[in-house]
Image (cartoon, rainbow, N blue to C red):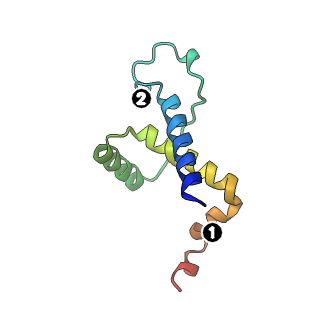
Amino acid sequence: MSQRNSNMMFTKLHSDAKIFSSGNGGKNMKDKTKDPNKRIAISMPEDAKKELEIMSKETGIAQGQLITLATLSMLVNYRHKGSFIFADLLNPEHKKN
């Protein structure tokens, strides 16, 4: 992928994340019916949650926004590369050689 396409994807992801946060990270949202975004509950292992908390503190980015950015990035990669994006997760052995 070219640097230009990569930058365009990041710009789009950043834009989507801004929409998600609605400028205040979702805090003090009085009328949730006006929120255009679907909400989902996720579960994750405790150690991953702790790492996410540390990452959030170090970057200054809310945990929800980090999850949103990661998810949007995965969706863009999936759109461009299909299920090959999961190859490293399913078979990391090919990277060792």
Residue 29: quarter of image:
top left
* Left or right, 67 with reference to 60: right
**Residue tagged by mark 1?**
87
Residue 37 badge? none
Quarter placement of the N terminus: bottom right
Q: How crowded is mark 1: few (under 14 residues within 10 Å), some or many (20 or more)?
A: few
- Which residue is painted at 52% across and 49% down in the image? 7
What's the residue type where badge 2 is placed?
Gly
Q: Residues within 10 Å of mark 2 (few under 14, many from 20)?
A: some
Dots 2, 1 in contact, CB < 8 A: no
Which residue is at a point 48% across and 32% down the rendered structure image? 18
Which amino acid lies under the numbered mark 1 shown in the image of this protein? Answer: Ala
Compared to residue 90, the image places residue 93 above or below, namely below
Q: Which of the two labelled residues, at mark 2 and mark 1, occupies the earlier sequence position?
A: 2
The front one of 93 and 50 is: 93
In this rendering, is residue 23 above or below 79?
A: above
Query: Percent position (x, y) of residue 10?
Result: 52, 46
Q: Residue at 32% across / 45% down in the picture?
A: 59
The residue under label 2 is: 25
Kindly give the residue lying farthest to the bottom in the view shown.
97
Q: In this view, does 12 lie above or below 38?
A: below
Looking at this view, is 9 or 40 the one in front? 9
The residue sitting at the left extreme is 58
Where in the figure is residue 22, as x and y percent of width and height?
Answer: 47, 25
Which residue extends farthest top?
A: 31
Q: How many labels does the image show?
A: 2
Residue plotted at (63% across, 49% down): 75
